[in-house]
Image (tube, rainbow, N blue to C red):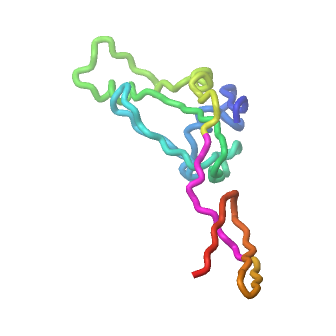
Amino acid sequence: KDGDLQDANSASACHYELYLKGSAAQSTVFRADVHEAYRDVDVEVNKLFGKDYNSNEDLLQETGYKIFCFAEDDWRLASDAASPRSPNYANVAGPRPSTLLAVEDFATDSEVTTLDLTPPVVTITGDASTETTITITLTLSEVGTAWCRAV
């Protein structure tokens, strides 16, 4: 949630890097390896990760979500494997991650809304008839339009 991310303590809830990277155990890792700069990639997100890092929940249809993205470079991997190494090579401890400020700056300004791709479920709850008409009473699992026809 906007404003919940923090970068002060990685042992506390909602540390931005841990939270945005997700957890394989919670099926909340949504990532793309980018092998070329300035090339579009798709990252499909279908779950929310619990602030406690121990839970998840599916995204709901027709619901707005703010999207945060995190990145880190692969400079160390690429430079350590380079042959020959640049005379300016300097060993670093690990990948350089986006800062919390950058994550917040690049977050979507407005919510992205999931679609409703499932048809409504029709439940017939009753019927009545006269000599020339049939009345069907039904409910839909979501807002929609129902049509009925005698065949």
Q: Residue furthest top?
A: 88
| Residue occupying the point 33% across, 24% down | 79
State whether residue 94 is above or below residue 128.
Answer: above
Left or right of 33 on screen, residue 105 = right
Q: Mostly what secondary structure, the magenta segment?
A: loop
Left or right of 86 on screen, residue 93 = right
Q: Residue furthest front?
A: 132
Left or right of 19 on screen, residue 34 = left
| Residue occupying the point 64% across, 48% down | 62
In the image, 101 versus 112, the foreground residue is: 112
State whether residue 41 is above or below residue 95.
Answer: below
Number of callouts: 0
Span of residues in magenta: 113-124
| Residue occupying the point 22% across, 21% down | 84
- Residue 48: x and y, percent? 63, 46
- Residue 133: x and y, percent? 72, 81
The quarter of the picture where residue 129 lies is: bottom right
Q: Residue furthest bottom?
A: 131
- Residue 103: x and y, percent? 58, 26
Left or right of 51 on screen, residue 105 = left
Residue 33 lies within the magenta run = no
- Residue 64: x and y, percent? 66, 41
Locate the C terminus by quadrant: bottom right
In the image, 82 versus 150, the foreground residue is: 150
Locate the N terminus by quadrant: top right
Residue 122 lies within the magenta run = yes
| Residue occupying the point 33% across, 28% down | 78
